[in-house]
């Protein structure tokens, strides 16, 4: 969670590394001006909303925060993302645009790589939502729901339906319902760690 300006800058730096964003050099500046990375723009706005929500939410800053929230909502709708603030740790990498729906009570650690058509949420009207560790790879179409925990260094397979907790790190979880199908070196999926 972003609690000060240094956290905000750290989150932006880690997200840029995760997305392989290079803002250095004349060519890259030219490319970013005419062909901006829309996912990077979304993630920068997400982090800015988190910063103003958590740190600068009084006086005139509150007006700016509401403007940012409005802008964030519109960009979320355009990209198909329903990602609330203060869910993901630093190093978030959204692989593609498309439908991603995340419950606001979900917590995901650092260095998460997430693909399209992923749903992470509560079940049966409960408030408790999944808690995911660090270095988690979530493949396209995965559904993760309920009051469950997923350990660090886990890969969740495409179209997996995860509705129970797992304890072992360095595993691949896949299937309907999900089960451990093997071991994994998570650095093969999340290259920047």
Image (cartoon, rainbow, N blue to C red):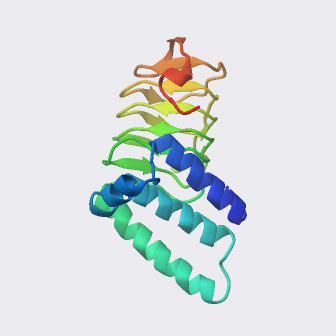
**Residue at (54, 68) in percent of width and height:** 49
Image mark count: 0
Quarter location, residue 117: top left
Where 11 falls versus 92 (above or below)? below
Measured from the top left, where is residue 159 in percent x and y?
36, 28
Left or right of 38? Residue 61 is right
Which residue lies most toward the bottom here?
60
Measured from the top left, where is residue 162 in percent x and y?
48, 29
Measured from the top left, where is residue 30 in percent x and y?
32, 59
Quadrant position of the C terminus in the picture? top right
Q: Nearer the viewer, residue 2 or 132?
A: 2
Q: Nearer the viewer, residue 27 or 68?
A: 27
Q: Is residue 37 visible?
A: no
Q: Nearer the viewer, residue 122 or 52?
A: 52
**Residue at (29, 62) in percent of width and height:** 78
Left or right of 137? Residue 129 is right
**Residue at (67, 55) in percent of width and height:** 1
Where 109 falls versus 13 (above or below)? above
Q: Is residue 153 visible?
A: yes
Quarter location, residue 58: bottom right
Measured from the top left, where is residue 74 in percent x and y?
35, 69
Q: Nearer the viewer, residue 38 or 115?
A: 38
Left or right of 158? Residue 14 is right
Quarter location, residue 75: bottom left
Which residue lies most toward the front here?
26
């Amino acid at each position: 969670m972003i609690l000060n300006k240094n956290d905000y800058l750290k989150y932006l730096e880690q997200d840029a590394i995760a997305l392989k964003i290079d803002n250095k050099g004349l060519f890259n500046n030219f490319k970013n001006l005419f062909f901006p990375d829309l996912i990077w723009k979304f993630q920068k706005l997400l982090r800015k909303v988190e910063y103003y929500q958590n740190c600068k939410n009084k006086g005139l800053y509150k007006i700016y925060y509401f403007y940012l929230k409005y802008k964030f909502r519109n960009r979320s709708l355009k990209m198909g993302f329903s990602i609330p603030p203060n869910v993901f740790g630093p190093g978030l990498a959204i692989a593609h645009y498309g439908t991603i729906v995340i419950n606001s009570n979900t917590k995901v650690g650092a260095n998460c790589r997430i693909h399209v058509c992923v749903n992470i949420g509560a079940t049966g009207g409960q408030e408790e939502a999944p808690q995911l560790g660090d270095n988690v790879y979530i493949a396209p179409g995965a559904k993760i729901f309920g009051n469950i925990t997923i350990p660090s260094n886990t890969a969740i397979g495409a179209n997996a339906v995860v509705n129970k907790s797992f304890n072992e790190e360095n595993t691949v979880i896949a299937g309907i319902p999900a089960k451990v199908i093997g071991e994994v070196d998570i650095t093969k999926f999340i290259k920047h760690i």
